[in-house]
Image (tube, helix red, strand yellow):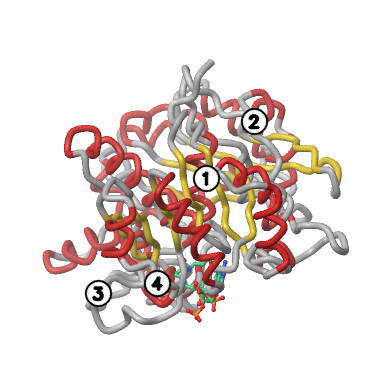
Amino acid sequence: MSKALDGVRILDFTHVQSGPTCTQLLAWFGADVIKVERAGEGDITRGQLRDIPDVDSLYFTMLNHNKRSITVDAKNPKGKAVLEALVKKCDVMVENFAPGALDRMGFTWERIQELNPKMIVASIKGFGPGPYQDCKVYENVAQCAGGSASTTGFRDEVPLVTGAQIGDSGTGLHLALGIVTALYHRTHSGRGQRVTCAMQDGVLNLCRVKLRDQQRLAHGPLKEYSQYGEGIPFGDATPRAGNDSGGGQPGRILKCKGWEKDPNAYLYFITQAPVWGAICDMIGEPGWKTHPDYAKAEARLPRLNAIFERIERWTMTKTKFEAMDLLNQHDIPCGPILSMKELAEEPSLRATGTVVEVDHPKRGKYLSVGCPIKLSDSPADVKRSPLLGEHTDEVLTELGYTREQIQALRAERAV
Ligand code: CAO
């Protein structure tokens, strides 16, 4: 079966997490992704957080599947000539160097257009144009600068970063969409273009509902936030809301049976208005269906703490999976708090390829997250990440270099 992006060649100048997330997705959809690294060390993540000595880390292997690796010294004139040959041959260049690094290598937008007017140049930076445009940025900086940290955590406690890598992987996802959009545009414009994503913008996009709440504050308290029921006045910025639901249906994380020993024996419970009657019956409060303090969603808002305390007395009598089964029989939305261990062992995620076992020549078998986007005619087969420079000779040969020329490049440390 052919792949959706068969024939698309990507010059992958990415490193660490944000850029590699993007090019890995494109590789899963069938693009030929040629990852350029420096000889010797390669992508810095190959050596970071290593669990096995001298073996590419899981950090690297889990972000670089289905790619080819070529080592090139971009600052060596002959290495630069190799890169120029790749620019002419490829459809897309993706990079996430610090601001200005690509220009300093000599690959300005103008130069790239001279070499290949159809080239799409896709970049991730920490910030867009403005006061911080020259700053280097990592995940948690983006979470803080993009509005996530100020709205995550509990009201009286410090801002929190989240375990979801919304700054790195989130921006990589945004960039991948920009690239396929530019590729589509090129089919009728005939031209390449620049695609840029700032991590701050990507995080803010994912925090859209919090900017919604910021504007709602001008018109009164945010009644679905528990602080409303607690009688605590709102300030002038969207507050941290603990585990309150971000939508119009109040929700909360509640203890389940075993919570005293198991840190993940919890369930997210949503008091969705259309199933309020079923919730009342389930928890043993049928009177709440008609009681004026509880019957209507608006009346419940000042009483959310008391309501969730009552529901929790019920969830604490069930395991999170028992509660999930019982509640779903009545279409009551809820979700167990699943640990990474539980996710790694979940058979349905293995069956769909969302969790995959990959074999690596140096580390052996390991688990990874497969492609979360499923295309019926272009399934993603997860192939192991490349060893450093594994495809240098192969790619140089495709570019027309002879074996002698490749040896000469190596002798000069250009590749
Ligand atoms: N040959 C020769 N030189 C190379 C090379 C190659 N193949 N690959 C990289 N380099 C050089 C670059 O040209 C750059 O040199 P100069 O500083 O002299 O121009 C140098 O390596 C370092 O690049 P960098 O500044 O991008 O790397 P860093 O480790 O110092 O910073 C990071 C890392 C992520 C903070 C920075 O790249 C950045 O801010 N990127 C944009 C935002 C981003 O994507 N952040 C998310 C990272 S994932 O958490």
Three-letter code, disc 3: Pro
Please name which of the two marks, 4 or 2, marks the residue nearer to the observer.
Answer: 4
Q: Residues within 10 Å of mark 1 (few under 14, many from 20)?
A: some
Q: Nearer the viewer, residue 90 or 32?
A: 90
The residue beneath circle 4 is: 106
1 or 4: tag closer to the N-terminus: 4
Tell me where residue 68 sits by quadrant: top right
At which x and y percent is residue 284?
51, 33
Which residue position holds label 3?
129
Query: Do labels 2 and 3 touch, CB within 8 Å?
Result: no
The residue wearing badge 1 is: 268
Q: Residues within 10 Å of mark 4 (few under 14, many from 20)?
A: some
Residue drawn at (32%, 50%) of the image: 116
Q: Image check: 250 left or right of 222?
A: right
Find residue 181 and report its horizontal and vertical position in percent: 28, 40
Q: Earlier in the sequence, mark 4 or mark 3?
A: 4
How far, Cα to Cα, is label 2 from label 3? 40 Å
Disc 4 on helix, strand or loop? loop
Residue at the location (66% across, 51% down)?
392
Up-down relation of residue 343 to residue 236 (above or below): above
Residue type at tag 1? Tyr
Type of amino acid at the residue the image marks with label 4: Gly
| Circle nearer the viewer, 3 or 1 | 3
Which mark's residue is nearer the viewer, 1 or 2?
Answer: 2
Q: Residue furthest left?
A: 219
Badge 3 element: loop
Label 2: element kind: helix
The numbered mark at residue 349 is 2
| Circle nearer the N terminus (2, 3) | 3
Instruction: First in sequence, mark 3 or 1: give its number.
Output: 3
Look at 26% across and 40% down and name the residue there.
296
